[in-house]
Amino acid sequence: MSTLYQTLGLPQGADREQIKAAFRKLARCFHPDVNASDVEAEKRFKEISAAYKTLMDPEARAAYDRALLRRQEMRRRRLWQSVPTALAAGAVTASLTLLALLWALSSPSPDQDSYGTAHQAGASNEVPARRASWTSYSNSRFLFTLSYPADVFSVTESADHNGAVLVSADGRARLRIFAAKNVTGMTPTEYRRFLLQNRYNGVNIDYAPRGKLWFVLSGTQGAEVIYEHVGFSCDGSSLHGWQMTYPAHVRTFFDLVADEVHRNTFLTGLHCGAIPPLPHSKPPSKGAPPEPPQLKPQLASR
């Protein structure tokens, strides 16, 4: 089932101007005045008109987004339930199936956890209870922490004060953790746009939620899946995040892992004033994003 955002060809975080522009473009194509006696065009015009009306009404959109969130949670639960079937089909190993089933039992319900709320400054950094295989990575310099499954990402490839690179035992999946000063002064929106136009040019983005101080970009390129979370300090002086890459044929399992890591990435303090912010008017140096070179997130090569 498509969403109202998909009906208009938009990402879920689209703003009002994007919604208006998308509606106008589609209306010119499907309006009854230019498609006389075309039943399908009339049906399509009604669909885009209904989507536009809902998404332009703040209260209606908020209610719809809540319903959409519940639908996503239900889908996530169905994915948990599908893991045994995937095992029978040979898609994932028995050990990964066991992990998924155990995590499903300890995952928060929709009533306990609103997706993404943990990423806002000042949010609680209390991680939901999990089995002992989950561990935490903390960065005292940039004041953020995240939880990840240590029995999946069991090999530390590299680590320093800017982050770490963790690898699965079979070498097929990588978790790159990074942090840096925001030397270019980019806002979250500007940096997201930069990534879409550069690093993710050619990547089929299929999941892209975002909040005031964070965003996620996830999609496929060939046989690889990429899932990246980027967060900003509340004053915009630094950024932090992680990128997970894994083979598409085990996506059912690793999408769930990535969702859990996303839900458990936190700022451990407001982090305002620790690193003096730079003016947003300062031009980026050679167009480069503010990230540590030695941990530059990129698609894993196979």
Image (cartoon, rainbow, N blue to C red):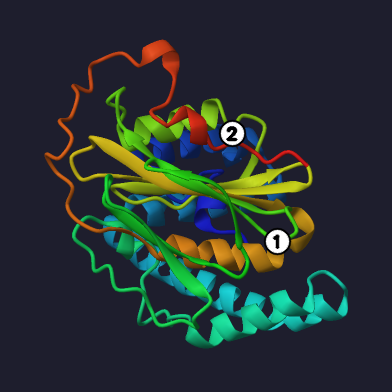
Instruction: State the residue at coordinates (18%, 47%).
Output: 271
Residue 181 coordinates in the image, percent (x, y): 30, 32
Q: Residue 293 carries which label?
A: none
Describe residue 71's horizontal placement relative to residue 52 as left or right. Answer: right
Instruction: State the residue at coordinates (48%, 39%).
Output: 23
Q: Which amino acid does label 1 sit on?
A: Ala
Q: Which residue lies furthest to the right in this view?
A: 89
If the image is split into quadrants, where does the C terminus sit? top right
Residue 38 coordinates in the image, percent (x, y): 71, 45
Q: Which amino acid does label 2 sit on?
A: Tyr
Describe residue 38's horizontal placement relative to residue 42 as left or right. Answer: right
Residue 285 coordinates in the image, percent (x, y): 37, 13
Describe residue 103's horizontal placement relative to residue 279 as left or right. Answer: right
Instruction: State the residue at coordinates (50%, 31%).
Output: 294
Which of label 2 and label 1 is nearer to you?
Answer: 1
Q: Can residue 176 be seen in this view?
A: no
Q: Is mark 1 on a helix, strand or loop?
A: loop
Instruction: State the residue at coordinates (39%, 40%).
Output: 162
User: What is the quadrant of residue 141 in the picture?
Assistant: top left
Q: Which of 228/4 is in front?
A: 228
* 133 versus 57 height, above or below: below
Q: Is residue 194 visible?
A: yes
Question: Would you name the residue on which mark 1 appears?
Answer: 169
Alpha-carbon distance for marks 2 and 1?
Answer: 27 Å
If the image is split into quadrants, where does the N terminus sit? bottom right
Local packing at callout 2 (Cα closer than 10 Å; few below 14, some 14-19, many 20+) is: many
Q: Which of 44/225 is in front?
A: 225
Question: Would you name the residue on which mark 2 appears?
Answer: 200
* 209 versus 289 height, above or below: below
Residue 53 coordinates in the image, percent (x, y): 40, 53
Local packing at callout 1 (Cα closer than 10 Å; few below 14, some 14-19, many 20+) is: few
